[in-house]
Amino acid sequence: MTTQSGFSATSTTQDVLAGMDLAGKRYLVTGSSGGLGLETTRALAAHGATVVMAARDEAKNAAAAESIRQEHPGAELEFMTVDLGSLASVRTAAATFMADPRPLHALIANAGVMATPYGTTVDGFETQFGVDHLGHFLLVREILPKLVQSAPARVVLLTSAGHRLGDIDLDDVNFESRPYDPLLSYGAAKSANILHAVEIDRRYRDKGVRAFAVHPGGIHTELGRYMTMEVITSLMDRIGEQGSSFSWKTIPQGAATTAWATTSELLNNMGGAYCEDCNVSPVLAEDDEGINGVGVAARAVDATKAAALWHLSERLVAL
């Protein structure tokens, strides 16, 4: 089911949150120290929410919080230090968070890396799969009991239209049997984010927790810091193959769909959906449209594959 929210690709966080009072709501945002995570945090806090800022670099996160407080002196901000590339770090951060009895109304899995050179996390997983999916998988699993207690609640996972660059191979998530391709790995990790949302929603919707995957659009942020000119050229060639124009978004426009998926009453009875441009997007009949266009690949919302990824992820993080 798609939506007609009245918002679009040019809508900003200010547009989608206009008139909202989020006092009493508590949200957790990973990757809060810059880019989309910082704007998401700022926008939610500006409307009265308490936001837990989760990031790896404590000093950078503190500076980000100070930048918000300069604009909004009364912003209610808290901190979590977590390295999503370390399962031990995720467990420690989650345990500390869960010891606090206060509620949590949404977990926004915003942090990530893109098109990295081949590498592994400290636990030995391919970097993009390990950080973009597996670290968030463990964090969400550990914090889901808090979301259930606080229901109605949501999980919002940042993905990308780049999921259509490549499917996830559940038999070779670490590229041990295939040549490594940074864009194929990125596509696989972003596909995993969508499948993760589908399975969270299936397992927890009856407990009051709904999940959404969000494509923010193309935005100039630190996410692309690992991309070489060769990778950028390859990506733009794949976009150009579709013969249509590509438009960059501002950061407030890019964070708008996240803010919308976190707060919109239009989504109260929905879940397991892929959102972009502040709406739920259609499922594509074919997985050959490239990455410049609206919609989600059918394989990325396949319930059987979502369940298989969940079980694999549980095994990999030793749950």
Image: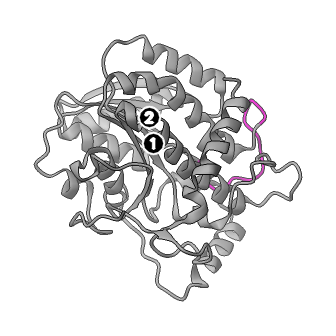
Q: Are marks 2 and 1 in contact (CB under 8 Å)?
A: yes
Spatial separation of the CA atoms under disc 2 and disc 1: 5 Å
Marker disc for residue 211: none
> x%, y% of residue 314?
66, 31
Q: In front here: 39 or 316?
A: 316
> x%, y% of residue 189?
63, 51
Q: Is residue 185 left or right of residue 45?
A: right
Q: In front here: 39 or 190?
A: 190
Residue drawn at (71%, 38%), measured in percent from left and top? 312
Residue drawn at (38%, 26%), measured in percent from left and top? 148
Q: Is residue 285 left or right of residue 276?
A: right
**Highlighted magenta segment, given as a residue range:** 113-124
Residue that numbered label 1 is attached to: 201
Q: At label 1, which amino acid type do we have? A: Asp
Q: Quadrant of the C terminus?
A: top right
Magenta-span inclusion, residue 204: no
Q: Residue furthest left?
A: 19
Number of callouts: 2
Residue that numbered label 2 is attached to: 204
Q: At label 2, which amino acid type do we have? A: Tyr
